[in-house]
Image (tube, rainbow, N blue to C red):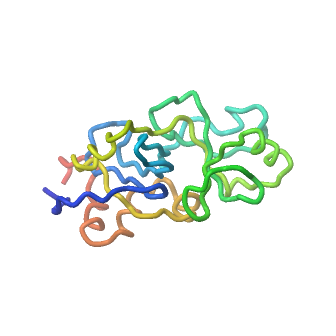
Amino acid sequence: MDYFATDQIIEPERGDLLISEPYLPDPNFERTVILLCEHDENGSFGFVLNKRAQSRLDELIEEAEGFSTDVFVGGPVQQNTLHFLHKSPATLKGDKKVVDGVYWGIDFEGLLSSINTRQVAKEELKFFVGYSGWSPGQLMDELKSKSWIVYKKASPEVVFEMNPDDLWREALKTMGGKFRVISNYPTDPRLN
């Protein structure tokens, strides 16, 4: 079934979501939603928003003791690194704006200080081990092969508030039309 009836490729931008097609064969990206933090001539970079890691933040970082919050698998690249998104530009300075209300955290020491002095709440943060990355041109090749659906401009609500277990389905439903139909595809097409 060709649910991508058009050959038009939507060029993604920083702040867009990449939604994996329903039967993407790569287990790293099965039914994932990625927030694209960078996309330019140097390549692309983002975080999977809906794949929980097995550890919580205070289990990974001693300095975050008592700050027990979910950590997500941001992608298959450098899974020995920890990253974060936040929505507190007044508290956490010098970070990079991804889209209005969503910032890619750079100052991890400042974050830990803000956590320990209770200047930032769990609801304002999202943590990731590893990230998703593409070399120059690689993401566009994947878009041409219909591996991803581009959802234009994420909102802070999608990034921080939507239930990660429902994110893939709900993002597609929000897009409407044929994407609403895709959101109901079974995980295993043989079960249809």
**Figure quadrant of the C terminus:** bottom left
Residue drawn 35% across the image and 69% down it: 175
Residue drawn 20% across the image and 50% down it: 191
State the image coordinates of residue 25 (x, y, percent, origin top left).
Answer: 27, 39
Q: Residue furthest right?
A: 117
State the image coordinates of residue 173 (x, y, percent, origin top left).
Answer: 36, 67
Q: Is residue 83 above or below residue 100?
A: above
Residue drawn 71% across the image and 40% down it: 108
State the image coordinates of residue 5 (x, y, percent, origin top left).
Answer: 16, 62
Q: Residue furthest left?
A: 1
Q: Is residue 182 above or below residue 21?
A: below
Left/right placement of residue 116 relative to residue 95 reads right
Q: Quadrant of residue 80?
A: top right
Q: How many marks?
A: 0
Q: Residue furthest front?
A: 41
Q: Quadrant of residue 9?
A: bottom left
State the image coordinates of residue 81 (x, y, percent, origin top left).
Answer: 59, 31
